[in-house]
Image: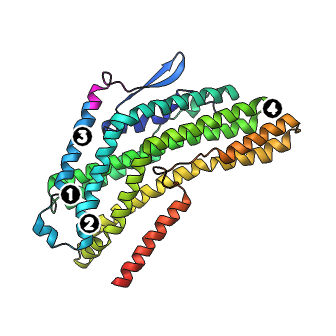
Amino acid sequence: MANLKPLDIAKDLKYIHVMCKCLGLSPYTINKNNFPEEVTIDYTFKNNIMITIWATIFAFLLFIGDILLVMPNQKYMLSLSVTENVNELVCLPLYSAVASLAIVINLTINKCKMYEFVTKISRIDNKLNRLNKTKYSLIHQKLIPDPEILIFMFIFLPYLVYDTSVWITGDSIAKCLDYRFGNIIDIALILHFCSCIKIIRKRLSKLCKCTEDMIMPILVIPQLRNVLGEICEAARILNSMYGLLVLLEFVKIFLTVIGNITSLITLLYNCDFEKAISFIIWKLIGMAELLYIVITCHMTVTKLNTLNNIIHNTVLSRYPLSTDMFQQIKLFLHQISTCGLEFTACHLFKLDFQFLCGVLASFVTYGVILVQFK
């Protein structure tokens, strides 16, 4: 495995940063310095005037769109069922509300925390490089975007154009476009969050490799423990950046999935299959967002189990255990079990498979109750 140069963090964020910058979610500039090798975040207003103005205008337009979404025609609302009213007054405005809030938070708080996160990751890379002297290879450089970014650009966005053409005849143009732009920003936000999580996972994988290949454990283990502590701190910074936004994303997904079932049944009953298929696809997109976040978080946290297995199966069987070395390994294992590496939604619940099973169970329960009432 190649060394992680400090400039790798810039490559890891390159494509997602450009995409988020176009949407007003990244009001900062990533700078790469070759001497010394480091990556820094410039979030000063004077060096990011255009993106700051663009993000402010974008957030304002989404806010205006929110007002339009919550001011529907009264006669039209009286003709709808309760769940359809919930969809019109809560679910649809929630998309653009979360999107505008994400832009505002990134403009004010998260740009400073992103500086802390990138600085922390660069420090981790420097420490990992001192532990592993493998020559860096250009083969390992990231030349293409992540698959999910390609899916977003070449599948989701073209579908969004088609979906807009389906619904724009029934809704006002402003409401329809506001809802779709809210969707674009929400998905970009999820991609950025998961990209940062995968950056942490990449460093954990490197830590596992360094642990497996170490030659003098009595000298290396304290450094490994220090790196693990830095990685956990980077995860805490990420939780503080995205905890509230991820919580709102889950609330949005939950409400839209269970709140639109009656609307879907009505469309099927009226044989409006084109809009019914659109409803189904949007629910599948919401579930895909949920699965993507939870699976990404779970795969990262399980790297600790890999590290624990390496110590038990490789380190303990390879080296004679002196008293000092045994104490160092014992402290390392204790740190792994108690380091608290986790990803949460505003500290209310962990983003793991247990949470995912609970959400799926609630969807199934709601569906069963709905069928019984029908």
- Quarter of the picture holding the N terminus: top right
Identify the mark nearer the N-term, 3 or 4: 3
Identify the mark nearer the N-term, 3 or 2: 3
Frontmost of labels 3 and 2 is: 2
Frontmost of labels 3 and 1 is: 3
In percent of the image, x 62 and y 40: which residue is there?
A: 204
Q: Residues within 10 Å of mark 2 (few under 14, many from 20)?
A: some
Nearest the eye: 333 or 205: 333
- What's the CA distance linking mark 3 and mark 1? 22 Å
Nearest the eye: 195 or 254: 254
Residue corresponding to mark 3: 58
- Any mark on residue 165, and which? 1
Query: Does any portion of residue 285 appear in the rendered image?
Result: no
Q: Residue furthest front?
A: 348
- Any mark on residue 218, and which? 4
Where does the magenta region start and end? 43-52
Frontmost of labels 3 and 4 is: 4
Frontmost of labels 4 and 1 is: 4
- What's the CA distance linking mark 4 and mark 1? 65 Å
